[in-house]
Image (cartoon, grey):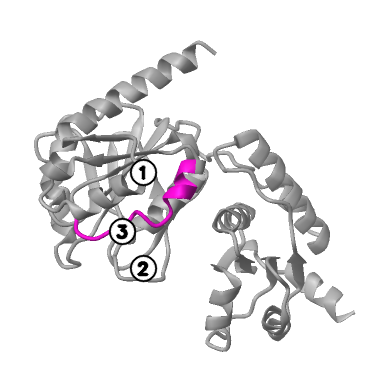
Amino acid sequence: MKDNARVLALREKNKDDIKVMVVSEDHHQRMAFSDTVRSCGFSLVGCMSRARLQEKQGRSDTAIDIWLIDSDYDDSVVTATTASKPAAVLVGFSQAPYLNEAPQYAKWQRKLKRKLAHMLALPVLMDAPVHKPDNADVSWRYVVFLGASMGGPSAIKEFLDNLSATLPVCILLAHHFNKMMIGTLPRILNRHNDWHCQVITSSQRLRAGHCLIAPIDKQIVCDSTGRVILLEQAWEGEYKPAIGQILKNTSDVYGSELINIIFSGMGNDGSQYLDLIQENNSQLWVQDPSLSACPSQPQAIIDSGYCGFIGSPADLAQKLIDYIDDRLVVASLH
């Protein structure tokens, strides 16, 4: 009876007031769950592994209405869910296809929405859009992710100067930079080319001809419709923004439509998830270390064995142009 009362109470709430927590061991599954939660109009309050949930246990008093759990339902998870007195807990669900596999992913998402609609007696959920951009004029076909650190601005500037802003690509840049100086980066990169470079200060969409720069103080997440969502939490780990984290996220979402390019930089940020990126058929290229002000970051990618092309910034721009031309020709033959 109490559970029914909680479900009935949800029907009186605005959808954006319904709070959802996602727990999964698989990063790709977490992305698919969170993408579906947002497309339902719900508020996603957390998306994490079981270990991360245990770390945070007792440190948050946020009420959670729905738990989506694709993980071992052990005592710690039971304790966390019980304490929040949710209206519904869904444990286990089929593995999501990759988000770039649109028909299969849409079918999976509809199945999850039907499950939630049935559990919550909210048939309106089925009216929510499924894996479909809310703007019909998506002007890009490929996402280009650039990662850089020390010595990066001049290399990326040269790359953009040799790349037409009319190509069907959008660019996302993660650059290890001083928080006080990140605002100067667009001015450096915008000179003498037609690219529109800006630091991300609010959630927005990827756009052709635009280079969006990840902020230093807040995380971003890309979803299947081309949104770049600005989160409230800070980056975790030593590097800010975390190139490896963004690289994995974008690879999971865009798969073979993603080209990753790592430029000059110190350290090995970006080399953590390369086996998964390879599985997603995303491209991975680097600036020639011998032409980099700081060679360690591109060299770490080369040493992984997953690098598909090495060149100067100008060479990388030409490689991208040729790659897109070849892909467009192949697409026109099918």
Q: Where the N terminus falls, by quadrant?
A: bottom right
Distance from disc 3 to disc 1, alpha carbons, whole Å, reads 16 Å
Asked if marks 2 and 3 touch (Cβ < 8 Å), the reply is no
The magenta-colored residue range is 265-278
Residue sitting at x 73%, y 73%: 73
Residue 235: numbered disc: 2
Residue 271 painted magenta: yes
Residue 15: numbered disc: none
Residue sitting at x 38%, y 63%: 219
Mark 3 vs mark 1: which is more N-terminal?
Answer: 3
**SS under mark 1:** loop
Q: Which residue is mark 1?
A: 305
Mark 2 vs mark 3: which is more N-terminal?
Answer: 2
* 2 or 1: mark nearer the eye: 1
- Residue 129 point in image, percent of width and height: 63, 43
Residue projecting furthest to the top: 333
Up/down of 258 relative to 118, above or below: above
* 2 or 3: mark nearer the eye: 3
Give the camera-side residue of 251 and 205.
Answer: 251
Mark 1 crowdedness (10 Å alpha carbons): few <14, some 14-19, many ≥20 = few
- Residue 201 point in image, percent of width and height: 31, 59
Q: Which residue is mark 3?
A: 269
Mark 3 crowdedness (10 Å alpha carbons): few <14, some 14-19, many ≥20 = many
**SS under mark 2:** loop
Residue sitting at x 53%, y 39%: 133
**SS under mark 3:** loop
**Badge 2 amino acid:** Trp
Up/down of 256 relative to 216, above or below: above
Q: Is residue 139 shown left or right of residue 174?
A: right
Give the camera-side residue of 299 and 83.
Answer: 299
Give the camera-side residue of 110 and 203.
Answer: 110
